[in-house]
Amino acid sequence: MTCIIGYADKENDCTWIGGDSLGSNGFTKDVQTPSKVFRNKVFKNVVMGSTSTFRHIDLLKYSDKLFDEIDMYKNTELNHEYMVTKFIPKLITLFKDGVVSYPEQGRGANFIIGAGNKIFEIQGDYSVLEPTLGFTAVGCGEYTAMGSLTTTKNMDISIPERITLALESAEECCCGVQRPFVIMNTKDEEVIVIE
């Protein structure tokens, strides 16, 4: 289920994250109102997009403890070391304390986080990846989206257009991806919705 895309925009000093809206248990499906692409409640310049469970999404969206050691509003730089040594331990605690279903307690979430013009992919085993391509995708639409993003990376089109094309490709080829698409960035409050 799901296609989430992160794209670093060095030119405009921000990161774009886009994703679909389908929720599924593998047998049934429904478009969900809580977006899988969202801003952290406390730090409005942190944008995330998540696969995994909607419980993980809720915890990521509303937690005020993920970044409490830095002041994101002063543009404190997040780097790989910070994400591994500070963010991940807080994330593990958040999921361990916040997920009540026993099989899910030990499981992480696969999601993308954008802060400033950096993107990080957090994997289900809590590994932290920082893509050298400047973009990444997660979810069942990952491979289709990455092909599209690679094809369009040198085209003279905007990053939201590249993300939209990649999400459309994933929707066409993957049964777990469906509109509306939601695209946000770390620079402003803009929310693009593609019905």
Image (cartoon, grey):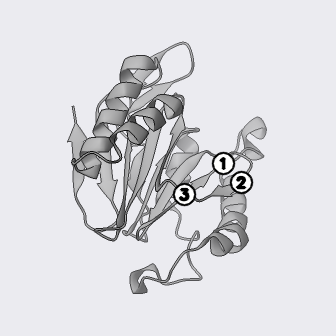
Quadrant placement of the C terminus: top left
Is 177 drawn above or below residue 106 in the view shown? above
Left or right for 127, reference 31:
right
Residue at 44%, 51% in the rendered image: 6
Task: Give the labeled residue for mark 1.
Answer: 123
Residue 190: % across, % down: 22, 58
Say above or below: 172 vs 183. Answer: above
Query: Mark 1: few, some, or many residues within 10 Å (few <14, many ≥20)?
Result: some
Secondary element under disc 3, as helix, strand or loop, is: loop
Q: How many marks?
A: 3
Residue at 68% in and 74% down: 81
Q: Quadrant of residue 89?
A: bottom right
The amino acid beneath tag 1 is Gln
Relative depth, front residue between 137 and 76? 137
Q: Nearer the viewer, residue 64 or 157?
A: 157
Q: Position of residue 131 (x, y in %)?
A: 56, 55
Percent position (x, y) of residue 2?
A: 48, 32
Q: Is residue 178 among what the camera can see? A: no
Q: How many residues crowd mark 3 within 10 Å: few (<14), some (14–19), many (20+)? A: few
Q: Residue at x 46, y 56 (%)?
A: 134
Mark before the other along the chain sequence, 1 or 3: 1
Query: Label 1 to label 3, Cα distance in Å?
Result: 16 Å
Residue furthest out toward the bottom: 74
Q: Residue 119 in the image: x percent, y percent?
A: 49, 60
Q: Which mark is residue 155?
A: none
Evaluate whether residue 28 shows in this view.
yes
Three-letter residue code for mark 2: Tyr
The answer to whether mark 1 and mark 2 are in CB contact below 8 A is yes
Which residue was labeled with disc 2?
Answer: 126
Residue for badge 3? 132
Q: Secondary structure at mark 2?
A: loop
